[in-house]
Amino acid sequence: MKTVLGFIDEAFRQIPETDKSYKFKMQLVSEVTERANELTHRGIKDEKVIEDLIISEHPDIKGEFESVLREEKRAKRRRHLVALNILGTVVFCLAVLVAFFIHLFKVDNGLSWIILIAGAFALSAYYTFIGCRRFIKKRGIIFHITTRLQLAFTIMLAFALAFFIMLFKFNIIHSWLMFPAGAIAVLACDGLFAHFSHQRFAVFMYLAYIPLAAAILYVILAIAGIVTWQTGWLIIPVALIIDAVIIAVRLLIGKKENEEVEEDSVWNAD
C-alpha cells in the first residue's frame, strides 16, 4: 500500500491544507484500505496488481475533492433556500392577514375575504413554479403527480378568485362560468406540461383533452349567448377533426422515423 499512499500524498500536495481536505484525505485512505482488503479476499495476491487497480480507480483525486466541495455547497444552498422559503412564506402569510384585518376594519365592504383568496393564489402559484422547475431534474412518479395536481389547483384557485371578484365586486350574472373556463385552462396547461416535460404518452392526453375542452367550451359559449345551442355543438366535431389531424401527423412522423432507421441500418450493414 506504500505506492497508493504515496500517490495520495502526491495528489494532496496540489490541494490547500484545510480541515475539509484533511477529512477527505483520511476518508480516502480508509476507503482504499478497505478496497485493498476486499481485493485480497477475492484472491488477488499480487500487491502491485492491487495497487495499480486502486490507483486506476482514483485517477483525479483533486477533481474528486473539488466535486465533494461543490456538492457540499449545493447542499448548503438548498438548506438556505428551504429556510428562506419557510421564512418568506411565514412573512407573506402574516402580511396577508394584516392586510385582511386592515381592510376588514377600515373599509368593511364585505370583500375583505378576497384578500385571503388572492394571498392563497399567490402562494400556490409560487410553489407551483418551484415544483415545475424541479420536475425537469426529478423524474419520480410521486413528484410528477404532485406537481400536476398543484398546477391544477393553482389554476382553479385563480379562476375562483376571478369568480368572486366578478360576482361580488361587479355583480356579473354568469360569473360561475369561470369554473368551467378554469377546467379548460387546467386541461390546456396539463397538456402543455406533459409536452414540455417530455412525457411518453403526452399525445394521448391531447387526444382526450381536446374534445373534452371543446364540449365544455360549447356549454360556456351557449350559456353566455355567444353561440346558439343548435349550432354551437359543431365545436365538438371540429375538435374530433383536430384529433384526427394530430393522429395523421403522428403516424407520418413515425413512418418517416422508421424509414430513417431502416436507411441507417442498411448503410451500416454495407
Image: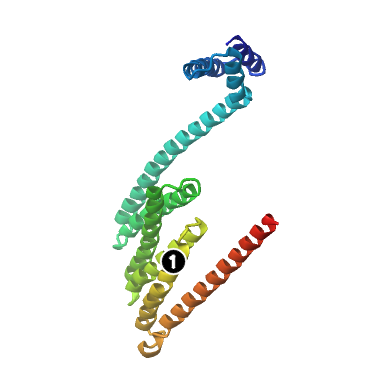
Residue nearest the viewer, comparing 45 with 76: 45
* Image point (48%, 15%), residue name: 37
Task: Locate the N terminus and report the quarter of the image it occupies.
Answer: top right
Would you identify the image quadrant in which residue 51 lies?
Answer: top right
Spot occupied by residue 111 in the image (x, y as percentages of width and height): 31, 62
- Colour approach in the figure: rainbow
* Image point (28%, 62%), residue name: 110
Is residue 203 among the parts visible in the rendering? yes
Left or right: 67 as drawn, with respect to 103: right
**Which residue bears the numbered disc 1?**
204
Is residue 121 among the parts visible in the rendering? no
Left or right: 164 as drawn, with respect to 13: left
Residue nearest the viewer, comparing 183 with 143: 143
Residue nearest the viewer, comparing 106 with 187: 187
Spot occupied by residue 2 in the image (x, y as percentages of width and height): 60, 9
Query: Which secondary structure, mark 1?
Result: helix
